[in-house]
Image (cartoon, grey):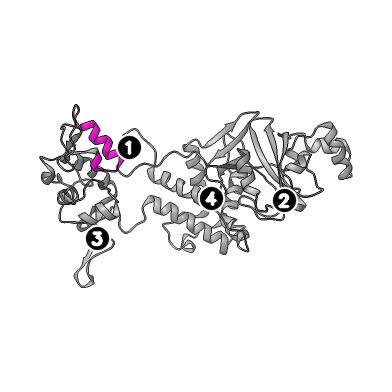
């Protein structure tokens, strides 16, 4: 086993002669390794016995397997940190072998009641101090997450409209962080790499719930669709006040949960059908993260740190913001990201039609913002006439505005009377 590029073989002598079963570890990847290399019917630590099959693997082999993952993230403090006796020793964050395994990595040994297995593992990793592989720099995932946090603060409180012009990294607090434009490009490259843009077929459905008020029935596509520009006065998760977008959900229950904050009002739901294909950025089905002890094949090109960042990024986009005076500030980062995907990002040379994200109001629910306004709603000839009359326009002009409409109201239901 090599530590870094040139470390001599790391001693596994304390583990030699022992066998341990998968029940002694909580980590799924260590369990899989034990299952694949089992050579004994008896576990020397929990005493478990296999009647007809091998259940325990040599502990020294397990230590070598674990060290491949540890070696990816950590190294000996003596090889990386400065030492100053007058200042308390190593100058930087570091751990002894016991704390590295138990506290930093979070190794869980559910059957190790007497601590004997942890003691043997600690002895294998030696009476040494450990630190991160590059202790004076940010890890790639820390750099990306920090860049996002800096971007959020920057566009909330420093510069909102011309932030993509930003080139001075010092204004972000560190030259290690990506500038806003660099980070947005990286996010775009990452979602492309993981094929998160899905093309929903013609006929796909989306549901939009609306409040019902007494003596104000809802019937037309306009009633169930997005507001007109003059009524788009509220700052929403993905769109600032004045910018019209279509908010809906992939199921009726989530659509209701997204708007049902006043039980004195009724609720009606409109079902809209896509009349063409739609390219949607799907942030609800991310590739799973790599486990700490999970090994990547030599042919894998997936950046595990970028994947960690993507999960954190999507979680922050879906975070619940309490209604109140700060909505117009706290929604700015998600509004900026949405605007970038709406205007700058391209999939197969074409713009996106919307973003699918996890609902903050209903666990497990999926909501969507579609880049559509009222002119993207399909109107029948009968529906054109009253619209033209209400807006004092000719029918041909109203029809021309809806020429490229792609959202058709196919069903409307009242689920609760006001």
Q: CA distance from mark 3 to mark 2?
A: 63 Å
Give the side of residue 128 with respect to residue 307, left or right: left
Q: Position of residue 211 (x, y in %)?
A: 72, 48
- Mark 3 burial class by Cα count in 10 Å: few <14, some 14-19, many 20+: many
Label 1: which residue? 296
Q: CA distance from mark 1 to mark 3?
A: 28 Å
Label 4: which residue? 317
Q: Please, what secondary structure does the residue beneath circle 2 have?
A: loop
User: Splitting the image into 4 quarters, where does residue 20 fall?
Assistant: top left
Among all residues in the image, which is located at the extreme top? 52
Q: Position of residue 302 (x, y in %)?
A: 39, 38
Q: Nearer the viewer, residue 268 or 287?
A: 268
Residue 167 visible in this rendered orientation of the protein? no
Q: CA distance from mark 2 to mark 1?
A: 54 Å
Nearer the observer, disc 1 or disc 3? 1
Q: Which mark is residue 197?
A: none
Residue 412 visible in this rendered orientation of the protein? yes
Q: CA distance from mark 4 to mark 2?
A: 29 Å
Nearer the observer, disc 3 or disc 4? 4
Q: Are marks 2 and 1 in contact (CB under 8 Å)?
A: no
- Residue 111 part of the magenta segment: no
Q: Pick whichever of labels 1 and 4 is earlier in the sequence.
A: 1
* Residue for point 41% across, 54% down: 143
Label 3: which residue? 81
Q: Nearer the viewer, residue 257 or 72?
A: 257
């Amino acid at each position: 086993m090599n530590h870094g590029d040139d470390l001599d073989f790391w001693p596994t002598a304390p583990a030699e002669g022992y066998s341990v079963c998968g029940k002694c570890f909580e980590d799924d990847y260590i369990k899989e390794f034990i299952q694949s290399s089992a050579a004994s019917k008896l576990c020397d630590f929990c005493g478990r016995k296999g009647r007809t099959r091998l259940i325990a693997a040599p502990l020294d082999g397990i230590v070598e397997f674990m060290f491949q993952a540890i070696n990816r993230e950590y190294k000996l403090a003596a090889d990386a940190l400065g030492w100053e006796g007058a200042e308390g020793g190593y100058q930087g964050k570091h751990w002894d072998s016991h704390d590295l395994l138990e506290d930093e990595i979070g190794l869980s040994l559910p059957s190790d009641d007497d601590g004997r297995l942890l003691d043997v593992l600690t002895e294998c990793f030696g009476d040494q101090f450990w630190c991160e592989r590059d202790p004076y720099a940010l890890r790639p995932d820390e750099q990306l997450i920090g860049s996002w946090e800096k971007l959020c603060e920057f566009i909330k409180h420093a510069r909102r409209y011309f932030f993509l012009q930003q080139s001075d990294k010092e204004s972000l607090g560190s030259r290690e962080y990506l500038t806003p434009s660099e980070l947005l490009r990286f996010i775009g490259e990452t979602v492309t790499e993981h094929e998160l843009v899905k093309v929903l077929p013609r006929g796909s459905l989306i549901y939009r719930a609306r409040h019902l008020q007494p003596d104000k029935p809802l019937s037309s596509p306009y009633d169930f669709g997005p507001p007109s520009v003059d009524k788009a006065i509220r700052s929403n998760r993905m769109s600032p006040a004045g910018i019209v977008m279509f908010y809906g959900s992939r199921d009726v229950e989530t659509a209701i949960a997204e708007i049902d904050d006043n039980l004195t009002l009724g609720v009606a739901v409109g079902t809209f059908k896509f009349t063409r294909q739609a390219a949607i950025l799907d942030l609800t089905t991310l590739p799973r993260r790599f486990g700490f002890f999970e090994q990547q094949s030599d042919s894998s090109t997936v950046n595990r740190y970028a994947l960690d960042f993507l999960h954190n990024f999507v979680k922050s986009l879906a975070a619940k913001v309490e209604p109140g005076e700060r909505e117009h500030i706290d929604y700015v980062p998600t509004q900026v990201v949405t605007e970038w995907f709406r205007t700058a990002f391209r999939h197969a040379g074409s713009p996106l039609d919307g973003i699918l994200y996890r609902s903050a109001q209903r666990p497990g629910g999926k909501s969507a913002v579609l880049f559509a306004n009222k002119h993207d709603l399909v109107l029948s000839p009968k529906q054109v006439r009253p619209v033209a009359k209400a807006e004092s326009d000719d029918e041909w002009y109203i029809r021309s505005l809806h020429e490229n409409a792609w959202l058709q109201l196919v069903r409307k239901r009242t689920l609760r009377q006001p």
